[in-house]
Image (cartoon, helix red, strand yellow):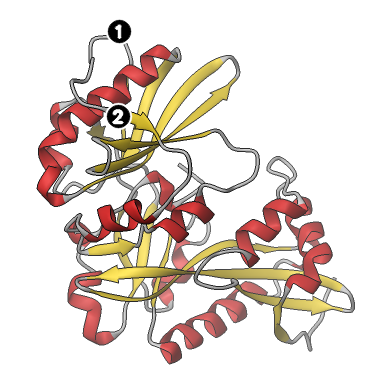
Amino acid sequence: MHNQDAEISLASAADSEPLLTLINLVQPHLPWTAAHLHWQFFAPPAGPAKLYVVRQDDQILSLYSAVPHAFSVGSGVIEARMIQDVMTHPNARGQGYLHRLAAHCMQEIERDNVVGYTFPNELSEGSFRRTGWTELLLVPSRKALITSHSHHPDITIQPNHGFREVETEIWNASGVAVGVRRDAPYLSWRYGKPNMDYRPFLVEHDRGMLILKLYREQGMCFVHILELTLRQSAIELLDQTLRFCFDFAATHGAKELTAWLPAGHQYAATFDAMGLTEQPRARFMFAYAPAELRSLVLDAAAWHLSQGDSDVY
């Protein structure tokens, strides 16, 4: 399959069928439904994804997606685009399509003066290094083995049925310097992903928020801490909140509790003390920032990163 004159264009919801065909051909082990495609690309609260594609007739040969999110930088909010779901039809590889799509996407990120970030696999890391992205840090993966019900919390942590203004207030009061805004619209979208088992909680009614994920595979259970954000004035509740996470994992028969958190984060010492120690994966996060924001955005310790930032952990 060769198309020397293939043109770059933007796909839309009208292209759902050929997008699904490509995605499910390239990754049959992780099939998408039409509902998943709509959620991922066309329902984000910051607007639909920019889907850069190469077409041949009614077929999409290559896809490079950039999903927009509201992004906190200091006291301001700008747009950030997460690069994800990058792929080419097996019969069209070796034509340089992804390189062309990546260059076009980068031109628009620079033109629009927005932040970019991504968690590429080892096969695509090199392209980001060559096109001006900063290798920010190794993905800050953490885990702890669950051995007993020994972490009973002494605070009130109750299930949260629907995201409201309180989550936005918690985020605004968290003291986070850099990261995707965990406000109510974002959380409602992010944890509205079809067919997933998410467990949201509020900490002491309105002092923090927590979202856990139960994951079962081959008869084993794992618990992932997808979100944990406290008001800065309530950071003393972190130890007890993590105790709740351990207890939740033990109660559900999980063998591991996992999280992402950079080493320089204000929560890191407590995570370390609780045994959620960093075990960096051989996988990098890359970021791009406009010149006036680089000193802050390209400071890995300033980022609030969690497993909720990616579907691959």
Which quadrant would the C terminus be assigned to in this image? top left
Is disc 2 surrounded by few (<14), some (14 to 19) or many (20+) residues within 10 Å?
A: many
Which quadrant would the N terminus be assigned to in this image? bottom right
Q: What mark, if any, has residue 148 been given in the picture?
A: 1
Relative depth, front residue between 209 and 40: 209
The number of numbered discs placed on residues in the rendered structure image is: 2
Counting from the top left corner in percent of width and height, residue 230 is at: 22, 45
Q: Which residue is mark 2?
A: 157
Question: Eyeballing the image, is 205 above or below 146?
Answer: below
Question: Which mark is in front, 2 or 1?
Answer: 2
Counting from the top left corner in percent of width and height, residue 23 is at: 73, 56
Question: Eyeballing the image, is 166 above or below 299?
Answer: above
Picture quadrant where residue 148 is located: top left
Identify the residue at image location x=82%, y=81%: 3
Q: CA distance from mark 2 to mark 1?
A: 20 Å
Counting from the top left corner in percent of width and height, residue 46 is at: 49, 71
Q: Amino acid at mark 2?
A: Ile
Question: Eyeballing the image, is 77 above or below 277?
Answer: below
Helix, strand or loop at disc 2?
strand
Identify the residue at image location x=55%, y=33%: 197
Horizontal side, residue 56 vs residue 255: left or right: right
Counting from the top left corner in percent of width and height, residue 168 is at: 33, 58
Horizontal side, residue 290 vs residue 295: left or right: right
Picture quadrant where residue 277 is located: top left
Q: Amino acid at mark 1?
A: Ser
Among all residues in the image, which is located at the extreme bottom? 111
Horizontal side, residue 311 vs residue 12: left or right: left
Picture quadrant where residue 278 is located: top left
Relative depth, front residue between 104 and 276: 276
Identify the residue at image location x=53%, y=80%: 105
Question: Eyeballing the image, is 166 above or below 243?
Answer: below
